[in-house]
Structure formats: structure tokens, C-alpha cells
């Protein structure tokens, strides 16, 4: 369990944002943390939709229950978030 | 006593040289200070400055320029511009003076380094006047805003900004250290005088002077004209050097210096000119968009001067042209969103009428950047102002030191590399390319995010960041320039029927 910074590229946003998360967080929790800084701030909400996370440029998202520490991401790596 | 005509003695005086006998040429002109390695010794004396002036002539003309600018200032002080000008214009003044005044003073050191270290006698002579120019620019651009300090503490940043850790200061210092202060005299004259001054400041000052007159600020207009007339002269310092480099088989080196300096200058100008021109200048006096200005003055005129010398457009030309439609809009959204980190009050510039103008100048603006503004406007109108300032920091480019922005849904991306075990993030392929040209030059610098994550900023929250940047210390941070009056049109439009 350790504080871990990621770079959030939230679909519809105009800027990459620094988001502090935890290595024990699931990717669903990581997505929620990223959403806090984008949805309703710079990106309109899409109620009822799930926010997914994937490595920048990857085709497929991480499983929602996958832990951040299992993704192979390094500190400040950029993660793409989008409404599914 | 009768004076000789300048033409009777100038060439002899300016090319007077000495041949060192007690020390070597490299001891007199150390390569790391003088630069220009590989240019044969006999070539340096052929440097022919395009603008010739004597000290007597220089002092006389400069005195007249100062008299003109200071007397206009004195005459118009009673007009009380501060209270009568559009607040967006006042913000431009705050941004300008803080970003420029002390840099001009730094530029006097840049020119002083030519005076001592340049191997070209003609360049040493001309740089002496350039050095004096820059001292004048530093002094006059500190004196003029001083009038406003008692009215508005944010003007104190004119003197404080470059000594602070404000994020704009980190970017400006990184840029000016790279362009003005840390290369040999020969290389600096190409980066700073040819690319930065000829390409950007000289032309930008012409536009800025016109904007000032349109906004009714004749004091600032006169000041900028006065500075620009010096700039037009000493900006020419680099061109003969560039020709010497090209003629002596160093075309690739010259091109590389211009390619680096052009991009870095352009990106800095998206903040200093791009945002003000398209968002702060009152709509009724706006003449051209930033993109139009860049296309007319930079794309057409500066590029012609490059091609006349036998050089090419920078390799990233297509990226640059696309960027003119995008980057400064993202930086404006960023600076407005993180307005507490600014020393000026940003104008939003997105009233319905202003959005029509933006859509006309930048087709598609409403469908991209406009959608982000829609979310912010909804928060303002619906009584959620706390949601209009992000609770975290933007990722910052390790070269430009600016937030990594892009067109929403289209071009926002991270460009990163790992070098010697450290990860570096860049705002574009060009910034990454610049880093890769000389990693030793850039690798040690820590941007704002590196400092934040490294524990240098305490407490590690937004309040700690603001204090680190000098906000709430030098002056309060920024807030909407027009006190959110522009939102009235949206409140009416979004009001429930009945």
C-alpha cells in the first residue's frame, strides 16, 4: 500500500491531470479518483455509464477489479479514462 | 572642433583588433563562452553589422525616445487608465510587465556576454548598444507599472515574478536560460537575436502597440513603440553570424539552433500573446486573431527571411501549423481554471458574442474547447463555483514547463521518454525532440510536478502550491477580470421558463 501518482487523460478533457491514487486501489477506484478531477469540472457527466481505464494507446481496458499494482504502470504514467 | 563624418572612421574603429601573444586564442575567447567553433579565425573580422551607429548618435536618439515615452506617460497619468480601461486590458499589462521587465534586464547580460566574448569585432561593437538597449528596457518597464502598485498589488509582480517559483516563472526562466544565457555568444545570437527577437518579440511588439492604441492605452503603446525601435536594431545581431555559419559549412547547426529556438519561442508566446489576443483584448477593438497574426507575421515574413538565407522551414512545420488552431485555447482554459495560480485576473472571453468570434476564427471551437467551457459555465450558473477550480495540478512538460494540453477528444496526449531511469513528460513531439538534442542540458531540471512529488512543496496540497508560487505572499492570486459579469447572458438563457 503506497501513494502512487498517475497522469489522467480523461476523454473530453483538455489537459493531463496529476491524480494521486494507491497501489492497492482497483482500477474502478482509480477511475473514480480520476473522474473526481474531470467529470463535472471539465467534462460533462454521463450518468449510468461506467468509467473504464486503459494504458494510453491500448485497445482494451483494465479489468475493473484489477489492482493498480498489477497493471505494470509506473509512477506518472498516463492512463486513459473514458465512459463505456 | 569639427567632427569627422562617421563614414570616415567607422570601419577602421570597429574592426580594430589585437593579436594575443601572451595567451592563446582559446584563452582569450574560451569556446564555451564564445562559441562558433569551426569558423576560421580570419572570418570573424568580416562580420558586417547591418545597422551602423556611433555612440554619440545612439545617445542622442535614445534620449529622444525616452523623452517621448516618459512625457506621454506624464501627460496621460490624469486620464486614470487603471480605473477606466477594460479589466481585460489591465490584466494584459500585469502579465506583460511581470513576464518582460526583468527578462529585459537579463538580456543586457546576454548582450554584455557578446561584448566580451564574441570573436567578431563588429558584433562586439553593436552588442554594446544592445546591452544599453536592454538596460533601458528593464528600467522603463519597471518604472511604468510602478505607478499602479499603490492601486493594485498584483502589479508588484512586475518586479517579483522572475524571482518567484510561480509556474510561469519556472517556464520563463527555463526558456530564457536556454535561449539567452547558457550558450556561446555565436549560438546565442542565432537563438536569441535571430529566432526569438526577429521572429517573435519585434513583430509581437508591433501588434501589441496597435492593440494598446485600440484599447485607449497610449502610454503603453508609446512605451512598446519605443522598445520595439531598439529591438528592430539589435535583433539584427544574429543575421551576419548566421550567414557566416552557413558559408562555413555549418548550415545544419544553424538550422538546428533555429528549429529549437523557434518552437520554444512560439510555445511561450501562446501564453504571452495567444491568450491575450484571443480572449483578453476587448472584442470591440480586437483586430485579428492570434492565428491570423502568426500567419501574417511569423509564417509569411519570418519564414521568408529564413528561406532567403538558404535555410528550410523547421521539420515540424505541419505540426506547428496545426498547433496554431489548438494550443493557446488549451492554455487559456488551463490558466482560467487554475486562476488562483496567476498574478493577473484572467478575462474569460467566452460570452456568447465572443464565442461567435472564436467559432468564426477557429471553426469547430464550440464543439471542442467550447464543450469544456459549457461545463464550467453550468457550474457557475448553477451555484457551484468550487467546481470551477480543479482540485489537483496539471501535468507539466519537462521542456516548455507549460501544462500538457490538447484539443478535447482529439489531440490531447502524453509524449514521454525514460532517460537514465527518470521519466520525462512532454507537451509535444517537438518538445521531446528538443530534449533529445541535448539531454545533458535539460535532464537535471525539475518542473513543478517533479518538485511537488519530490516533497519540495509543503504542505503538499493546493494551498502549499500557491504559497510556493508566491500567491498570497506577493499579492492575491487571480480571479475573473470582469467579476463574472459575462455570465449574465448565460443566466438569462439558462433560467427556467416562467
Image: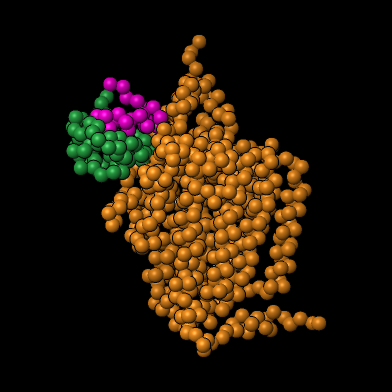
Q: What shade does chain B have? A: orange
Highlighted magenta segment, given as a residue range: A28-48
Q: Is residue B4 left or right of residue B260?
A: right
Where is residue A3, by image quadrant? top left
Quadrant where the image shows the N terminus of chain B: bottom right
Q: Does the magenta stretch include residue B340?
A: no
Residue B347, percent across and down? 55, 36
Task: Residue B186: give x, y in percent of width and height.
Answer: 48, 71
Residue B242 in view (yes/no): no
- Quarter of the figure with residue A16: top left
Residue appearing at x 41%, y 61% in the figure: B259
Question: What residue is shown at x 23% (from left), y 42% (from top)?
Answer: A73
- Pick the residue in front: B207 or B362: B207
- Residue A41 highlighted magenta (yes or no): yes
Position above or below: B319 against B285 = below
**Please, which residue is most extreme toward the right here?**
B1
- Looking at this view, name the residue that lies furthest to the top: B498
**Measuring 48% from the left and 14% from the top, which residue is drawn there?**
B496
Counting the numbered discs, the total is 0
Query: Residue A19, how many percent across, how many down?
Result: 34, 36
Left or right of B15? Residue A73 is left
Give the quadrant of residue B367: top left
Reply above or below: B394 against A50.
Answer: below
Residue at (46% x, 30% y) in the render? B388
Residue B442 pos. (x, y %): 38, 58
Indicate how the structure is coloured in the image: by chain
Front-most of residues B431 and B425: B425
Q: In this view of the protein, can residue B24 be seen by the observer?
A: yes
In the rendered view, does B145 fall on the left or right side of B43?
Answer: right
According to the colouring, which chain is green? Answer: A
Amino acid at each position: 500500500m503506497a501513494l502512487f501518482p498517475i497522469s489522467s487523460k480523461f476523454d473530453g478533457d483538455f489537459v493531463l491531470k496529476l491524480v494521486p491514487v494507491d497501489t492497492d486501489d482497483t482500477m474502478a477506484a482509480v477511475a473514480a479518483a480520476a473522474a473526481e478531477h474531470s467529470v463535472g469540472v471539465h467534462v460533462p457527466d454521463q450518468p449510468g455509464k461506467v468509467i473504464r481505464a486503459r494504458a494510453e494507446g491500448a485497445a482494451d481496458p483494465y479489468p475493473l477489479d484489477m489492482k493498480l499494482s498489477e497493471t505494470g504502470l509506473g509512477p506518472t504514467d498516463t492512463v486513459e479514462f473514458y465512459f463505456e | 572642433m569639427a567632427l569627422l563624418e562617421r563614414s570616415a572612421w567607422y570601419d577602421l574603429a570597429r574592426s580594430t583588433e589585437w593579436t594575443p601573444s601572451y595567451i592563446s586564442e582559446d584563452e582569450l575567447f574560451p569556446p564555451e563562452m564564445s562559441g562558433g567553433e569551426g569558423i576560421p579565425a580570419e572570418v570573424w573580422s568580416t562580420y558586417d553589422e547591418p545597422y551602423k551607429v556611433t555612440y554619440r548618435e545612439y545617445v542622442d536618439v535614445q534620449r529622444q525616445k525616452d523623452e517621448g515615452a516618459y512625457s506621454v506617460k506624464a501627460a496621460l497619468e490624469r486620464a486614470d487608465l487603471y480605473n477606466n480601461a477594460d479589466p481585460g486590458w489591465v490584466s494584459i499589462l500585469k502579465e506583460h510587465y511581470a513576464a518582460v521587465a526583468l527578462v529585459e534586464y537579463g538580456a543586457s547580460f546576454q548582450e554584455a556576454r557578446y561584448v566580451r566574448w564574441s570573436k567578431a569585432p563588429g558584433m562586439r561593437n553593436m552588442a554594446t548598444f544592445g546591452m544599453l538597449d536592454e538596460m533601458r528596457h528593464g528600467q522603463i518597464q519597471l518604472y511604468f507599472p510602478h505607478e499602479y502598485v499603490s492601486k493594485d498589488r498584483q502589479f508588484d509582480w512586475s518586479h517579483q515574478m522572475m524571482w518567484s517559483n510561480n509556474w510561469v516563472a519556472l517556464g520563463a526562466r527555463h526558456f530564457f536560460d536556454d535561449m539567452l544565457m547558457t550558450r556561446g555568444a555565436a549560438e546565442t545570437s542565432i537563438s536569441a537575436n535571430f529566432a526569438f527577437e526577429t521572429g517573435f518579440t519585434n513583430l509581437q511588439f508591433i501588434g501589441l502597440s496597435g492593440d494598446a492604441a485600440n484599447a485607449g492605452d497610449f502610454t503603453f503603446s508609446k512605451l512598446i513603440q519605443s522598445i520595439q525601435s531598439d529591438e528592430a536594431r539589435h535583433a539584427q545581431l544574429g543575421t551576419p553570424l548566421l550567414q557566416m555559419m552557413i558559408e562555413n559549412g555549418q548550415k545544419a547547426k544553424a538550422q538546428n539552433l533555429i528549429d529549437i529556438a523557434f518552437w520554444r519561442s512560439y510555445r511561450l508566446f501562446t501564453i504571452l500573446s495567444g491568450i491575450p489576443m484571443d480572449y483578453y483584448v476587448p472584442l470591440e477593438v480586437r483586430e485579428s486573431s492570434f492565428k491570423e497574426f502568426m500567419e501574417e507575421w511569423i509564417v509569411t515574413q519570418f519564414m521568408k527571411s529564413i528561406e532567403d538565407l538558404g535555410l528550410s522551414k523547421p521539420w515540424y512545420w505541419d505540426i506547428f501549423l496545426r498547433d496554431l488552431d489548438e494550443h493557446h485555447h488549451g492554455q487559456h482554459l488551463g490558466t482560467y481554471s487554475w486562476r488562483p495560480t496567476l498574478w493577473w485576473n484572467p478575462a474569460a472571453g467566452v460570452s456568447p458574442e465572443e464565442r461567435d468570434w472564436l467559432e468564426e476564427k477557429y471553426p469547430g471551437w464550440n464543439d471542442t474547447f467550447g464543450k469544456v467551457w459549457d461545463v464550467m459555465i453550468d457550474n457557475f450558473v448553477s451555484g457551484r463555483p468550487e467546481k470551477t477550480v480543479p482540485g489537483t495540478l496539471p501535468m507539466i512538460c519537462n521542456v516548455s514547463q507549460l501544462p500538457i494540453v490538447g484539443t478535447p477528444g482529439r489531440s490531447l496526449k502524453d509524449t514521454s521518454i525514460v532517460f537514465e531511469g527518470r521519466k520525462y513528460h512532454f507537451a509535444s513531439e517537438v518538445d521531446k525532440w528538443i530534449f533529445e538534442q541535448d539531454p545533458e542540458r535539460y535532464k537535471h531540471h525539475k518542473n513543478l510536478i517533479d518538485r511537488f512529488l519530490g516533497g519540495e512543496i509543503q504542505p503538499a496540497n493546493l494551498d502549499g502550491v500557491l504559497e510556493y508560487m508566491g500567491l498570497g505572499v506577493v499579492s492575491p492570486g487571480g480571479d475573473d477580470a470582469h467579476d463574472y459579469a459575462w455570465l449574465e447572458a448565460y443566466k438569462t438563457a439558462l433560467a427556467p421558463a416562467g
